[in-house]
Amino acid sequence: MNEQRHVFEHAKIHPAVREKIAKHHRDIVDEVQAAVAKHDVVVVGMGGNPNPGRARKLLQSKNIPHEYLSYGSYFSLWRRRNALKMWTGWPTFPMIFVKGIFIGGADDLEKLDASGELAKLLAGPHAA
Ligand SMILES: N[C@@H](CCC(=O)N[C@@H](CS)C(=O)NCC(=O)O)C(=O)O
């Protein structure tokens, strides 16, 4: 299977709407991108969803410092969160980044921890 994410071809987007797409809630994407560049571990979550808390608990239990960004709740800011989903291609929260690498959600963090890969990623370089 082709592991490359399937996205609509840029060349086939009409020039009149390209800027609108590029700027769509760009500030929230820039904010997360800057945090990912600055911190070894970033958890992006939202209020009322237990899964970001599950991920954070695991990190705290291992004394792994992390930056936490939270946007809205089930009842607010869904449009802004949607811009992050379109950026990463990941449909749910939390979105977790380790050393600049997007590793998925809380389940994926647990798997990486259990396999020992989380420690390896943390010991390695920060992806540019
Ligand atoms: N298996 C995922 C569960 C995360 C999940 O399903 N989150 C839901 C809420 S419970 C979500 O973010 N939905 C999208 C949204 O509400 O914007 C994980 O381990 O991170």
Image (cartoon, rainbow, N blue to C red):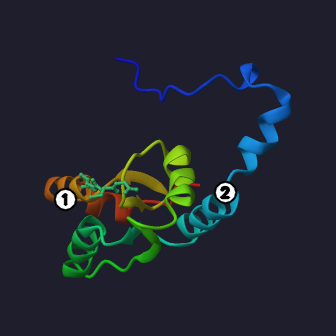
State whether residue 112 is above or below residue 55: above
Q: CA distance from mark 2 to mark 1?
A: 30 Å
Circle 2: residue type: His
Circle 1: residue type: Glu
Q: Nearer the viewer, residue 83 or 104?
A: 83
Residue that extends furthest to the left in the rendered view of this protein: 114
Residue at 45 percent across and 77 percent down: it is 67
Q: Position of residue 42 (x, y in %)?
A: 44, 68
Label 1 crowd (10 A; few <14 / some 14-19 / many >=20) = some
Q: Quadrant of residue 117?
A: bottom left
Q: Which residue is mark 1?
A: 110
Q: Determine whether, in the image, residue 23 is placed left or right of residue 84.
A: right
Q: Determine whether, in the image, residue 85 is placed left or right of residue 121.
A: right
In front of the other: label 2 or label 1? 2
Q: Position of residue 6 (x, y in %)?
A: 50, 25
Q: Nearer the viewer, residue 58 or 79?
A: 79
Residue 25's tag is 2
Residue at 73 percent across and 45 percent down: it is 22
**Mark 1 Cβ and ligand 1 under 8 Å apart:** yes
Label 2 crowd (10 A; few <14 / some 14-19 / many >=20) = some
Q: Are discs 2 and 1 less than 8 Å apart at CB?
A: no
Q: Quadrant of the N terminus?
A: top left
Q: Determine whether, in the image, residue 47 is placed left or right of residue 9.
A: left
Q: Quadrant of residue 3?
A: top left
Residue 119's tag is none
Q: Circle 2 — which element?
A: loop
State whether residue 85 is above or below residue 110: above
**Between discs 2 and 1, the one toward the N terminus:** 2
Q: Determine whether, in the image, residue 104 is placed left or right of residue 107.
A: right
Residue at 31 percent across and 55 percent down: it is 105
